[in-house]
Amino acid sequence: MSDEDYVYDEASGEWVPASQVAAAEVVEVRDAVGNLLADGDQVTLIKDLTVKGAGQTLKRGTLIKSIRLTGDAQEIDCKYEGIKGLVLRAEFVRKR
């Protein structure tokens, strides 16, 4: 008997190795051109974006440093000077 942990999969009704579940939950996030994004990447905006609640517009070409993936295939979390909790759609950025 192996020492591997097992997790109950409610969809199939079976016990599966935890390593298989972790591999299945990985979400690929791609930018507007199709490049694969990862935590810590730098991205550039490809369109002027009005930030709701901040009264500010981020101009095309703005560099966003150190992004974080959220688990959603189309959203990335990032920090920008003067804006807290900024979440951008991946379709509006290009990997630098």
Image (cartoon, grey):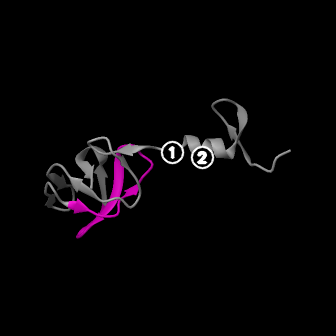
Judge whether 94 appears above or below 63 on screen: above
Viewer-side residue, 88 vs 38? 38
Q: Which region shows up in magenta?
A: 63-85
Provide residue 3's location: percent of width, then percent of height. Answer: 80, 51
Q: Is residue 73 magenta?
A: yes
Q: Which residue is mark 1?
A: 26
In which quadrant of the rendered image does the N terminus lie? top right
Which residue of the protein is positioned furthest toward the top in this rendering? Answer: 12
Does residue 54 appear left or right of residue 67 in this picture?
A: left
Depicted 89 relative to depicted 40: above or below:
above
**Residue located 72% across and 33% down the image:** 14
Picture quarter containing residue 31? top left
Residue 50 in the image: state x and y as whole percent.
16, 54
Say whether residue 12 is magenta. no
Residue under circle 2? 22
Q: Residue at x 34, y 63 (%)?
A: 66
Which residue is pictured at 18% across the width and 49% down the height?
46
Quarter of the image where the C terminus is located: bottom left
Task: Please tell me in which quadrant of the rendered image residue 91 appears.
Answer: top left
Residue 24 location (% of width, % of height): 56, 40
Tell me which corner region of the image, top left, top right, bottom left or bottom right, holds residue 9. top right
Of the residues shown, which amino acid type is indicated by label 2? Ala
Residue type at tag 1: Val
Q: Do the numbered discs 2 and 1 sit on residues whose CB atoms are within 8 Å?
A: yes
Residue, far right = 1
